[in-house]
Image (cartoon, rainbow, N blue to C red):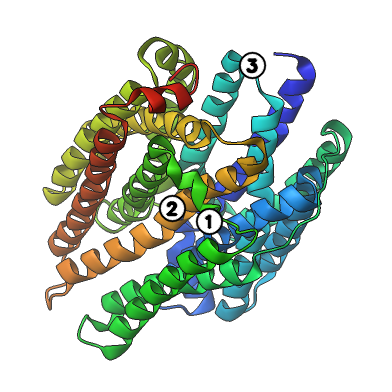
Amino acid sequence: MHQSKWIILTIIIACQLIVVLDASIMVTALPEIGRSLHMTATSLTWVQNSYILPFGGFLLLGARAGDLLGRRRMLGVGIGLFSLASMLAGLAPTAEFLLVSRAFQGFAAALATPAALALLSASFVEAKERSKAIAMYSAVSAGGGSIGLLLGGFFTDFMSWRVGMFINVPIGIALMYLVQRYIQKTGTRTGRFDFWGAIVSVIGMTALVYGFVQAAESGWGKPETWISLAAGIILLAAFVLIEARATEPIIPLRLFANRQRSGAYLGRFLMVCGNFSLFFFIPQYLQNVLGFSSLEAGSAFLPFTGAQFGIMYLIPGMVHRFGNRNVLMAGLLLAIIGTLWISWIVAVQAQFFPEMFILLMIMGIGAGMVFQPLTALGLSGVDPHDTGAASGLINVAHQSGSSLGLAILISVFDAANRTDEHSQMHFAHAISSSILGSVLFITSALIVTLICFLPASQSVREQALPDA
């Protein structure tokens, strides 16, 4: 790979790392944030969701902006706004200020991320280079969550949770300089922004997440829970109608005409629903049951991250030999086995080493084998003028899965933990039930894979990537 391409790939991966990392960097700091800003346990979930929801909701608008205004420009603007929002979040004097700043962060990330992935797709055309670049990008996308846990724990224990926000500022400034110097200016074109589609999708997804959070806080019998869930479903249905009628939609529905691509988007959504929630619940078990510090809880995910990054170097060869579909199914099976077993480990309150250590490695290998094929299949056969929308849709599936999966499994946790006896045993049982919910999500991703990719018709095979 030419040196200039390595620089471009480094910029893209660094951009993806900081935006993915910030989805989890607050997790191990949540108890300290709650104490310093006087936030309840339920309200702390919005420290995560206030970032993830705008991120996922505005990704498609960000992809459209890149197509119309130029991807290099939107990458630079997104990184700049992200750095500013990070500084504001680090300075937050109140909980409300923090949540608004996190939402601003999510919006900025939505501008930068699809531009970065579209630039990767355009910069690496040759099959072998493209496969390697996507493997590295996918590993960072999946492993950034555990890196965030580690950094968040370190900053919380030795400095302050606010440092996790401030550190984005110098990184962002450096990336803006590198973008202007090493990434060529991309073309612009005339067109329209599907603003109403973006707004309706964000409000609809937020209403769904709010409904599940309300169910956890107030119970399923409250009218506001069902009103919020119903509003979310209606608004998301309205979003589909808007996209079908829009002259230039943020999601061209033709992207779903290919069965493989549709399966890749849905499979990614379900996989992330189960996988991302583990980064929230396992640290709670480690800190509240096993007595780990914030840093120790973050460090506990090193086996996951190490295994995931290790398998990254083998994935291109595995895909070339066995195909994207087979590697994807094998990874999902490993993820299911590891997650199911770790649910049992938590239920019996076993110590971290050796059982959980080994299982996190297995889960890391499984996740590392899943995301690269899903990314490749989600971009396969896409027309050049739809590249930005397809890139955005991949990230929408990822971020929507993060927020909705966590909201659903928080309600599972609350239902299992709703007892007058507040003991470590009941808490561990509730965490185990939530992790079992993760298993169901990942199993659903495997079923989608089997339905959408096997058996493949000849026409579908012809649209797959050369290494698929």
Kind of residue sitting beneath label 2? Ser
Q: Is residue 435 visible?
A: yes
> What is the secondary structure assignment of the residue under circle 2?
helix
Q: Tell me the residue that label 1 is attached to.
A: 156
Q: Is residue 154 visible?
A: no
Q: Earlier in the sequence, mark 1 or mark 2?
A: 1
Q: Is residue 218 above or below residue 176?
A: below
Q: Position of residue 333 (x, y in %)?
A: 23, 31
Spatial distance from mark 3 to mark 2, Cα to Cα?
43 Å
Q: Position of residue 385 (x, y in %)?
A: 67, 41
Spatial distance from mark 1 to mark 3, Cα to Cα?
44 Å
> What is the secondary structure assignment of the residue under circle 3?
loop
Q: Position of residue 177 (x, y in %)?
A: 85, 41
Q: Nearer the viewer, mark 1 or mark 3?
A: 3
- Given residues 374 and 19, the one toward you in this image is 374
Q: Tell me the residue that label 2 is attached to.
A: 294
Q: Earlier in the sequence, mark 3 or mark 2?
A: 3
